[in-house]
Amino acid sequence: MLVDRILDQNENEIHLYVVDSTKHRHDDDTRSVGQKGIGRGKIVLYRGTDKVWNQFLWRRHIYTRDMIFARIKE
């Protein structure tokens, strides 16, 4: 995922606007239902109990996974 911008953050949450081509749409995604390819949408990351940013919210459930993000700096 590419981070387009940080929308909000606090000690244990980061709200991001990301660009990617995931199989499943994000909240507020620019792709219409069933559309494939690159799109933009919102994602919320959480810091786990081990203080690692490895949790995210999707469809009202928090998942724990290894994730890779990049941000292009101008």
Image (cartoon, rainbow, N blue to C red):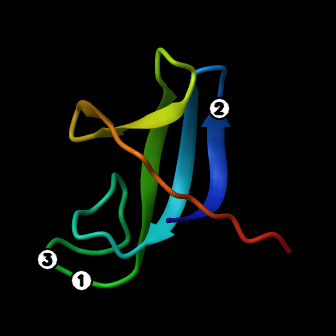
* Mark 3 nearby-residue class (10 Å; few <14, some 14–19, many ≥20): few
* Mark 2 nearby-residue class (10 Å; few <14, some 14–19, many ≥20): few
Q: Residue at x 54, y 34 (%)?
A: 53
Residue 3 left/right relative to 61: right
Q: Are marks 3 and 1 in contact (CB under 8 Å)?
A: yes
Residue 67, how many percent across, how many down?
45, 51
Labelled disc at residue 47: none
Residue 24, how many percent across, how many down?
22, 63
Q: Which residue position holds label 2?
A: 9
Q: Which residue position holds label 1?
A: 36
Q: Which residue position holds label 3?
A: 34
The amino acid type of the residue labelled 1 equals Lys
Residue 71, how many percent across, how many down?
69, 64
Q: Earlier in the sequence, mark 3 or mark 2?
A: 2
Residue 69, how many percent across, how many down?
56, 59
Q: CA distance from mark 3 to mark 2?
A: 31 Å
Q: Residue at x 42, y 46 (%)?
A: 66
Secondary-structure class at tag 1? loop
Total marks shown come to 3
The amino acid type of the residue labelled 3 equals Gly
Q: Earlier in the sequence, mark 1 or mark 2?
A: 2
Q: Are marks 1 and 2 in contact (CB under 8 Å)?
A: no
Secondary-structure class at tag 2? strand
Image position of 69 with respect to 31: above or below = above
Secondary-structure class at tag 3? loop
Q: CA distance from mark 3 to mark 1?
A: 6 Å
The amino acid type of the residue labelled 2 equals Gln
Q: CA distance from mark 1 to mark 2?
A: 29 Å
Question: Viewer-proximal residue, 19 or 27?
Answer: 19
